[in-house]
Amino acid sequence: MLYDVNSGWIGRKRMLRYIKACLALEKRRGQEFTAQEVLEEAKSPGSPLHDFFEWKDRVAGEKWRLQQARHLIAAVRVYVVDSEGKKFPMRRFVSVSVDGDDGPVRRYTSVFRVLKDHDFRTQQIEQAVADLENWLKRYHAYSELKSVRKEISVIVSFLRSKYPTAEKKAKKREVAVKT
């Protein structure tokens, strides 16, 4: 079976090890498992999943608080009025890439700034295209959604023609895993 490795921050070999461990857990648990069971499996230093997790509580606590901060930022909503006068909720802050001292960094900024700034607006449209492509991949096996996938594919193709840099950024790696 071929697996899509959707992670630029985990090396290919490590990801393959994690995939195999999750498949083995699935088999042992009778085709279903929970995140808690993955964590329990990983607690053993000999587990192939062990090095995926941060085991130093101080470091893990800081990472968790950063994740909580991201959730807080994402939870702030504002109502925006579109060109037809219809109100709809949007995230007030969005993540954008800006130039830092050591290269691009992710920062949050106002959705209103993004809507007015060409570069930030383009980043958000490229993200929307990537989200649509991920949706197409996620639900490809569901025949009930075939007509919806077809329409979304047309939209993605149109947007790709207008925003070609998004296609260059959409890099995925596949690995073969014997099951």
Image (tube, rainbow, N blue to C red):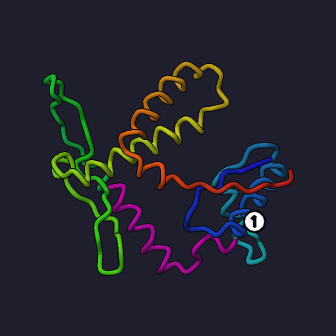
Measured along the vertical axis of the image, is residue 51 above or below residue 17?
A: below
x and y, in percent, of residue 55 in the image: 59, 77
Q: Is mark 1 on a helix, strand or loop?
A: helix
Q: Nearer the viewer, residue 20 or 173?
A: 173
- Which image quarter: residue 46? bottom right
- Residue found 41% across the figure and 39% down from its top: 161
- Above or below, 25 against 99 in this view is above
**Which residue is tagged 1?**
17
Residue 79: % across, % down: 18, 36
Image: 19 above or below 146:
below
Residue 171 in picture, x, y percent from top left? 55, 55
Q: Residue at x 35, y 80 (%)?
A: 102
The residue positioned 83% from the left and 49% from the top of the image is 27
Magenta residue span: 50-72
Q: Is residue 66 magenta?
A: yes
The x, y position of residue 176, in whole percent, is 78, 54
* Residue 52 figure quarter: bottom right
Residue at 58%, 22% in the rendered image: 145
Disc 1 marks a residue whose amino acid type is Arg
